[in-house]
Amino acid sequence: MRVEPAVPSAVLAAVRAPLEASGAERADAPLLQPLNLLLDLAGEAMRARLFVVQAEGGAESCLRPDFTVAIARQHIESNRAAGLYWYQGAAFRASSGADRPEEFVQIGLEMFSPGGGGVEAADAEIAGLAWRAAAAGGRDDLSLWLGDVALFGAFVESLDLPESLSGRLKRVAGRPRLLWAELSRTGETTGDSAGTLSGLLAGLSETQAGALLEEVWALAGVEPVGGRGPAEIAARLVRKAEAAQAPALTQLQADAVRAFMAIDDEPAYAFARMRELAGANDGALKAALSGWEQRLIDLALVAPADRTRFTPALGHAFDYYDGLTFEVRSAALGADLPVAVGGRYDGLLARLGGAGQARAVGCMVRPWRAWTGAEG
């Protein structure tokens, strides 16, 4: 395993200082995390980037690739309505690049609230903290890149698509690979999966589909591996069948979506372009864009406006973000090696068993990349 070089203690302290000064309490996360949970949140494609561990006869786990999910689970278990936590520790992700470290240090902060207003202010506060922490490493070539997963959903609504197609696009908003696959279906007629196993499972309840799949396994003498149960696999097959049967975008609609995702400009120009591309039903998009005015005002107090850009396609390895996303980038390191990342992930809390109205936003800084002595 390739280990990231050590960062001077003074740099670690400087990067950490803005997060500690926020009043957050220290948190930690177990080194081993449940594999299936992370795959459900990030998609099966993430497996190749995880270090999988399995004791004989036990469930599969993986070395901690990230702190967010683990700290969110701990917060939910604490039964607190609100919480603010900072962390520092090693994370692990497999890499095919010979020069990429697979063990590296993260310093981050997670903010949880019971719901209600204040979303814009909290978003700006966390993005601002990430900027200050990244800048504390000494770099003077930083820029702040902003995005918002929710804006894509509002844009899709403006196009007045069939409900099934609109829902599919919204679900894959944070997964570029799946989104481009949907765009590649442009102009297709509805498929027919009735003769496939996924088609046979479609229309059944999750329990019924799981029971049927388990019966097929028993008849075929198949023993499942990898820790995934029949209900979980059946649910994925059903989604595959639904995808094949769903209506496709027209060429005009697909072009509008591609143009929306290609936006990359100063925020004011980016938002103007979104309004130009929107369909007639643009009320939700206008409301979402109005919320960005306050975020930008607050962020301008921390990050220079001339170093701020907006792109709706901004996403991260984990696709649980459902609102604001951001990256702090270094011109020397490039877009593939962000110094800091973060965003809003309200929906993750509900998926982990938290209250439906709970809210969450967080950030993570790579101190090695923030340090002026680092090369990548």
Image (cartoon, grey):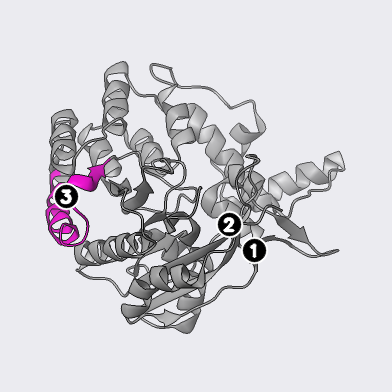
**290 magenta-colored:** yes
Q: Is residue 134 left or right of residue 238?
A: left
Q: Residue at x 74, y 63 (%)?
A: 59
Residue holding disc 2: 38
Q: Residues within 10 Å of mark 2 (few under 14, many from 20)?
A: many
Mark linked to residue 305: 3
Task: Give the CA distance from mark 2 to mark 1.
Answer: 7 Å
Residue at label 1?
A: 34
- Please name the residue shown 72% across and 55% down the image: 52
Instruction: Note whether 166 is above or below 345 in the view shown.
Output: above
Within-10-Å neighbours for mark 3: few <14, some 14–19, many 20+: some
From the viewer's perspective, is 76 left or right of 226?
left
52, 240: nearer the viewer: 52
User: Which residue is situated farthest in the front direction here?
Assistant: 373
Q: Give the mark nearer the N terminus: 1 vs 3.
A: 1
For this rendering, which residue is in front, 94 or 285? Answer: 94
Give the magenta-colored segment's residue range: 286-310
| Camera sees residue 193 | yes
